[in-house]
Amino acid sequence: MPASLRPLLSEAQIQSRILELGNQISADYPDGTLYLICILKGACFFLADLARAIHRDAFIDFMGISSYGRGKSTSGEVRVTKDLDISIEGADVLIIEDIVDSGVTLNYLTHLLKQRHPKTIRVVALLDKPERRLRPVDVAYVGFEIPDEFVVGYGLDYAEKYRNLRDVCVLEES
Ligand code: IMP
Ligand code: MG
């Protein structure tokens, strides 16, 4: 499939929004134990930048979730491919996700993690496509709302490609 990339969010736009999110999160969690849970693989760059924009101690852990396969829309089936290494009991948990689309992944994940008795649990997503929602998800912090288009870059992939682009681009089939 020949494809072209149309820039949507520049590296500078992304980085400046992440600084704002980091300030807001730092103010919202003045104390307590904050756990940043990065959803692999798409949120890895977002975690790296956001964690350094948060001015307080934070633990970091990773969770692997797969709901997609190789296509552009959700299969509806969610699977944990890598679980947390640490216990989140009694902790303030912030789930770090690249993008909320149908909401299936985060709806499943928040229910799963709530069963482990964290003190609080919130979601921060770099991107949100609200038009596509099938399941309700409460996203406390959103980087950017974007239209219903398939995007890649800054961690986001299409069939594992394009993750290492610095900008977020719309993938257009041509
Ligand atoms: P949801 O379960 O439909 O909300 O899908 C969430 C996951 O689908 C995200 O974590 C991404 O991995 C993937 N995804 C959704 N939309 C896009 C997109 O536009 N580009 C790349 N991946 C996407
Ligand atoms: Mg993902």
Image (tube, rainbow, N blue to C red):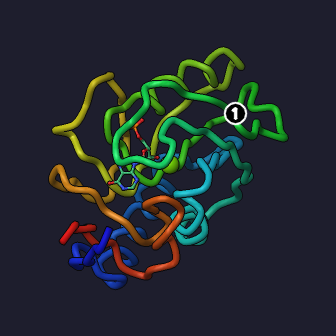
Q: Secondary structure at mark 1?
A: loop
Q: Position of residue 11 (x, y in %)?
A: 36, 82
Query: Which quadrant of the structure image shows residue 166?
Result: bottom left
Of 22 and 173, the residue lying toward us: 173
Q: Residue at x 33, y 51 (%)?
A: 142
Q: Residue at x 33, y 69 (%)?
A: 17
Mark 1, ligand 2, within 8 Å: the answer is: no
Relative to 60, 96 lies left or right: left
| Residue labelled with disc 1 | 91
Q: How many marks?
A: 1
Residue 110 vertical placement versus 158 (above, below)? above
Q: Position of residue 127 (x, y in %)?
A: 33, 55
Q: How many C-alpha atoms fall within 10 Å of the one at disc 1: few (<14), some, or many (≥20)?
A: some
Residue 152 vertical placement versus 77 (above, below)? below
Q: Which residue appears farthest toward the top when viewing the image?
A: 115
Q: Position of residue 35 (x, y in %)?
A: 68, 45
Query: Which quadrant of the structure image shows residue 144?
Result: bottom left
Q: Quadrant of the N terminus?
A: bottom left
Q: Position of residue 66 (x, y in %)?
A: 57, 39
Residue 33 vertical placement versus 11 (above, below)? above
Q: Residue at x 37, y 40 (%)?
A: 140
Q: Residue at x 41, y 71 (%)?
A: 153
Relative to 131, 78 lies left or right: right
Q: Quadrant of the C terminus?
A: bottom left
Residue type marked 1: Ala
